[in-house]
Image (cartoon, rainbow, N blue to C red):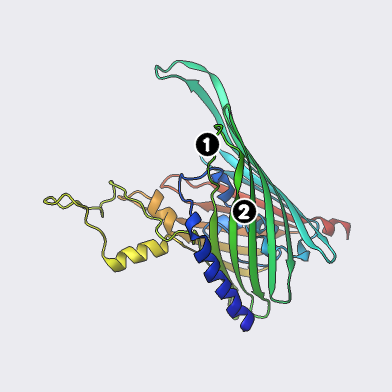
Amino acid sequence: MNKIRYFFIAIFFTIISVSSFAQIGGNSVYKFLNLSSSARTAAMGGNFLAVKDGDLTQAFFNPSIIQPSMDNNLAISYVDYFSDVNYGFASYAKSFNKIGTYHATVQYINYGQFTYADETGQTYGTFTANEVALAVGWGRSLDSLFSIGANMKFIYSGLEQYQSYGLAVDVAGTYHNPKNDFTMSLLFRNIGVQLRPYVSGYNEPLPFEIDFGLSQKLKHLPFRYSILLTNLQKWDLTYFDPDDPDNKVDPITGETEEESGFAKFGDQFMRHVIVGGEFIPSKYFMVRIGYNYQRRKELGNYNKMGMVGFSWGLGLRISKFQIDYSRATYQLHTSPNYITLRVNLSAFGK
């Protein structure tokens, strides 16, 4: 119990010490680094998962869940995002005695083809835009309950004639109790710098983020729930939207009427929360759901919210392969498709 207490104390003081480095919204570069790494993650609300069950796709966001069971595992993800935009991941892991387990991951995003045009509508050909991150990660257990891990990411971004290079580091710690299948993780993501900015002399910050998550598999039901707290480096993630019907203007003073204290607190708190669930009736079939409050508030239509912010997915284990599929609703008529394939290559040699 003392170790758990010290773990939470460390979480508290670390969050306080780095809270001034908040980077939200359009205030940073290389935002593609925060895209969901797998169909499983996307189905349960996005961001990351605090689950230590040998899923290699989680290592890119949470290196502290890297474990020896990932040895010789391969994982590939593809996302048909918006319009002509698509992105994906490819990861491989190898375990070494005494020093821990490593993974190598390639993440890319292709923004499609664009047309050169001036203010009169005259066109001058086409150009492309893409970004890539190469990551090497390491993780190992400190004892039967605690594990740590880190990623190093080398980043390239090419947007038409503008090019940029960057370097980022992730560090994470996880507490995992296998007896009751309870896990919690603390992550510090994208700590780094632009080595070469798009415009000389104008360096921009990376999308630094502090996240905390936990998951619990129920004892008498084949169900695991997940609760994530994201962007802990900054409390207020709200912004003023003049189209929001709740932002009423006093006709006499001209001032905007703010929400009550409790409603304001609840809105600000929930923008940090992502909840998800995973129904696992057997090791061959899984059903997943998720809800992202911040996504719903920022991307939903005020007149008709629909299922914005919700996500769902399925998992199938066929022979030696684990196949995951999911959809996440960002707008009323926009739901990207995620598909992930995982396999243990060692199984083919048995």
On screen, residue 183 versus residue 309, left or right, reads right
In the rendered structure, are the residues bearing label 2 and label 1 in contact, judged by CB atoms less than 8 Å apart? no
Residue that protrudes farthest toward the bottom in the picture:
1
Which is nearer the eye, 266 or 302?
Answer: 266
Residue closer to the observer: 279 or 199 = 199
Residue 328 position in % (x across, y down): 50, 52
Q: Residue at x 53, y 69 (%)?
A: 13
Foreground of the two, 30 or 200: 200
Residue name at image x 61 percent, y 69 percent: 280
For label 2, the crowd category at 10 Å Cα-Cα, with few meaning under 14, some 14 to 19 and many 20 or more, is many
Q: Tag 2's secondary structure?
A: loop
Disc number for residue 38: 2
Q: Position of residue 295 (x, y in %)?
A: 44, 53
Q: Which residue is mark 1?
A: 202
- Residue 158 lies, in percent from the top left, at 60, 33
From the viewer's perspective, is residue 20 above or below residue 108?
below
Residue that sits furthest to the front in the current view: 201
Q: Is residue 49 visible?
A: no
